[in-house]
Image (cartoon, helix red, strand yellow):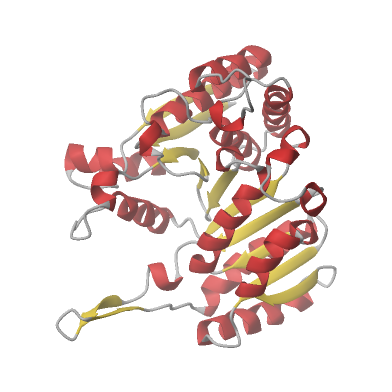
Amino acid sequence: MKLKIALLAGDGIGPEVIDQAVKVSDAIAKKFDHQIEWMPALTGAVAIDAVGEPYPDSTHEVCLASDAVLFGAIGHPRFDNDPSAKVRPEQGLLKMRQKLGLFANVRPTFTFPSLIDKSPLKRERIEGTDLVFLRELTGGIYFGERGRKDDGNTAFDTCTYTRSEIQRLAKKGFELAMTRSKKLCCVDKANVLESSRLWRETVQSMEKDYPEVEVAYEFVDAVAMRLVQWPNSYDVLITENLFGDILTDEASVISGSMGLMPSASVGSKISLFEPIHGSFPQATGKDIANPLATVLSAAMMFEMAFGLHEEGALIRKIVDQSLEEGIVTEDLIEGNDKAYKTSEVGDYLASQIK
């Protein structure tokens, strides 16, 4: 199979972890007789430096011409520390999601047997955890009307949703639940927010189309508590943009490291695959960042974008093997165990595939 993949390395550790995912993907392609055409493009702070825009039109054209997008991370401290900055790397991410129609973020959270005691939560609370968040990506408070008034002394951000935006996200959630344990949780704040009441009534109206799915409705604050008490009680959760942003980061630490969790952002035409972590500027250029989340994102890409499930399964298998054998970066070591460099982990994974 010929695969055209846009490669958006981004900022910080993005290029370093993306390099390892490319190594692994190329090894997979060779083993299974695929041809990958990598299509590099700029986004984030590096794109601002080069052309003044965090998601240039040229990058958008590359993405549109591809079958899938593999993305690293964006962000730079000089923008984080400058509240007056008019152009920011994160604007590129929002623009990319909107222009590519990436309306659903798929974030799995699962545990690795060899790392279960590295979680900040007790073993008995997290064993068996295997949940997936579907977060709406192109609506809500991040895209609503915003501004200042009263001479800049009052600020406002507006959360707006349409029924159709909720329906398309919920449809993905119901469909995913049907392939798993047939349990779906709608996360909202319907006791306070009008937008959440629309979410709840819309999902309720769709239940009849999926009679086999058991649907629960929980307030976001209750879910935030239960995620650290009994995360293994959840299966598929759907929620709006802001709630999903916060809850998925909370869920990500259950596994023991944010460097382990992959994600996908899907739309009607193209999908983007990325690790859940940020650009980690403190580690940039040190060859110490954990590449496994990016490698596992590539596994999701093979499966979800191309239907290549054997290839994705092999990537996950060799990632599990690297964890069991201790071929890991410094965020996962204990005591005097050896810490491997980012590039060494990538080399190991690729060699095991070959």
Depth check, front residue: 55 or 29: 55
Whether residue 294 appears in this view of the structure is yes
Residue 289 on image: x %, y %? 48, 30
Above or below, 180 relative to 171: above
Q: Tell me the quadrant of the picture where the N terminus can be found.
A: top right
Residue 122 on image: x %, y %? 76, 50
59 vs 260, left or right, is left
Residue at horizontal 55 percent and vertical 20 percent from the top:
346
Residue at horizontal 61 percent and vertical 31 percent from the top:
332
Residue at horizontal 73 percent and vertical 43 percent from the top:
111
Depth check, front residue: 20 or 271: 20
Corner quadrant of residue 286: top left
Q: Tell me the quadrant of the picture where the C terminus can be found.
A: top right
Residue 3 on image: x %, y %? 53, 29
Whether residue 175 appears in this view of the structure is no
Depth check, front residue: 108 or 78: 78
Residue at horizontal 61 percent and vertical 73 percent from the top:
221
72 vs 207, left or right, is left
